[in-house]
Image (cartoon, helix red, strand yellow):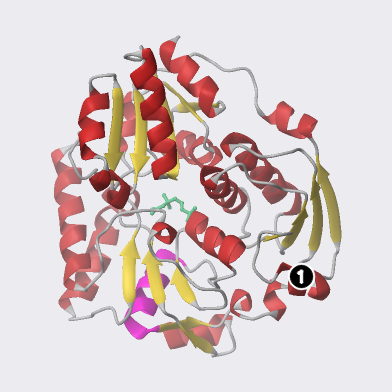
């Protein structure tokens, strides 16, 4: 099947890949037909031939997100099928946290934030493979050699100037979304962007690829080999992003029912910062939900228990984008542009943006 797809999209050429990461493994997003597809592959004896990880599921590791029995059952069928194919069911949207991909190595990843992260901040090469293709590629060990697996296909096409100072997670997300919306396709070459921390890099990568089809940007001074990319550049577009552009994106904040941090999954530092803040201030008035990766979660289990008494709910392996649990809320405040995009579409719940500090203020308001 991979060869047939390659005939259609890459002139029959394929590229061997070191790792795969599949998306579309939540019963909420793939439903019955998706489960049947996975069960069909598993029952045919298919096995992955490379390290393959999976995106978040509809249910978290400790059962904090209570969902219908039907979803529990569907999710467990998905896990069973994935496990029998040899997929590492370490449900995370941030596999780059523990798979330290090297520059100029090939990968078949399907989750757009993760692809954009490794392409942009590591110059590791992955195109956006649809979930089923990433899985088929994991079994075959190769995927179609589409443009992003070639140097020519990674040639920057748009010059972007961002002179705003260090970008925190919300600003980084807005910059990603604005570049995505204004350019739409091609490869942006970004000058002047400084990311305040790891969370900001994650939010930028997630927003760029949520608000456009782009999964690679060259960030001057940050992307490995950026000088070579600059030499190759063939700029057709030129845009500037200003502090005013960012301000106009972040509208007045409506009072939320809950605050949500962790789309993409929050890194350890972010979790620890929030924990320190609530330890100092005491229980929040509105619940704060934080999704993080199973790896981080396992390291901080004692803290998770401690802050649950402060109305802070840290969970892992699932997120509020792919879990139907989200539907019980009316308004969610978040610093994630990706959550802002998907939650209203998938769950019909309103989402308002806030900087991390403002989000916490809202939790205490
Ligand atoms: C809901 C989901 O499709 C989010 C969108 O992912 P992406 O940004 O298109 O990779 C993820 C998933 O189903 O695993």
**351 to the left or right of 28:** right
Q: Who is closer to the viewer here, 145 or 104?
A: 104
Q: Work out which residue is located at the far top of the displayed protein and give it.
A: 365
The structure residue drawn at horizontal position 39% and vertical position 71%, both measured from the top left corner, is: 20
| Viewer-proximal residue among 251 and 104 | 104
Counting from the top left corner in percent of width and height, residue 276 is at 38, 26
Q: Magenta stretch mostly in which secondary structure?
A: helix
- Splitting the image into 4 quarters, where does residue 187 fall? bottom right
Q: CB at mark 1 closer than 8 A to ligand 1?
A: no
Q: From where the camera sits, is residue 347 visible?
A: no
Give the extent of the magenta segment.
130-141
Residue 233, image x and y in percent?
81, 70
Label 1, residues with CA under 10 Å away: few <14, some 14-19, many ≥20: few
Where 244 sits versus 210, above or below?
above
Residue located 44% across and 60% down the image: 96
Side of 7 where 32 appears, left or right: left
Up/down of 233 relative to 291, above or below: below
Circle 1 residue: 227
Image quarter in which the N terminus is found: bottom left
Q: Quadrant of residue 164?
A: top right
Q: Is residue 66 left or right of residue 275?
A: left
Task: Identify the residue at image location x=20%, y=30%.
Answer: 305
The C terminus appears in which quarter of the rendering? top left
Residue 27: percent from the left, percent from the top?
27, 50
């Amino acid at each position: 099947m991979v060869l047939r797809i390659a005939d259609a999209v890459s002139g029959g050429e394929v590229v061997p890949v070191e790792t795969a990461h599949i998306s579309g493994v939540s019963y909420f997003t793939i439903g019955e037909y998706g489960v049947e597809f996975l069960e069909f592959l598993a029952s045919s004896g298919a096995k992955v031939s490379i390290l393959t990880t999976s995106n978040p599921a509809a249910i978290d590791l400790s059962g904090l997100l209570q969902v219908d029995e039907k979803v529990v059952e569907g999710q467990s069928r998905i896990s069973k099928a994935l496990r029998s194919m040899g997929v590492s069911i370490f449900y995370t949207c941030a596999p780059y946290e523990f798979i330290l991909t090297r520059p100029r190595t090939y990968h078949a990843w399907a989750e757009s934030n993760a692809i954009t992260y490794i392409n942009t901040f590591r110059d590791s090469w992955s195109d956006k493979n649809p979930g089923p293709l990433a899985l088929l590629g994991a079994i075959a060990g190769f995927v179609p050699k589409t443009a992003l697996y070639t140097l020519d296909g990674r040639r920057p096409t748009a010059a972007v100037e961002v002179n705003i100072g260090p970008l925190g997670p919300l600003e980084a997300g807005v910059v990603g979304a604005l570049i995505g919306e204004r350019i739409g396709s091609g490869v942006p070459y970004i000058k002047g962007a400084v990311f305040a921390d790891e969370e900001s890099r994650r939010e930028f990568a997630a927003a760029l690829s949520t608000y456009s089809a782009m999964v690679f940007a060259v960030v001057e001074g940050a992307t490995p080999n950026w000088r070579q990319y600059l030499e190759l550049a063939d700029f057709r577009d030129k845009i500037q992003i200003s502090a005013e552009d960012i301000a106009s994106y972040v509208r007045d904040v409506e009072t939320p029912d809950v605050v949500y941090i962790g789309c993409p999954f929050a890194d350890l530092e972010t979790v620890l910062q929030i924990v320190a803040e609530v330890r100092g201030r005491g229980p929040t008035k509105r619940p704060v939900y934080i999704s993080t990766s199973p790896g981080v979660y396992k390291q901080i289990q004692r803290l998770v228990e401690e802050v649950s008494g402060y109305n802070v709910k840290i969970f892992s392996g699932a997120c509020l984008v792919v879990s139907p649990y989200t539907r019980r809320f009316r308004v969610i405040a978040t610093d994630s542009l990706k959550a802002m995009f998907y939650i209203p579409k998938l769950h019909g719940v309103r989402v308002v943006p806030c900087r991390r500090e403002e989000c916490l203020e809202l939790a205490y308001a």
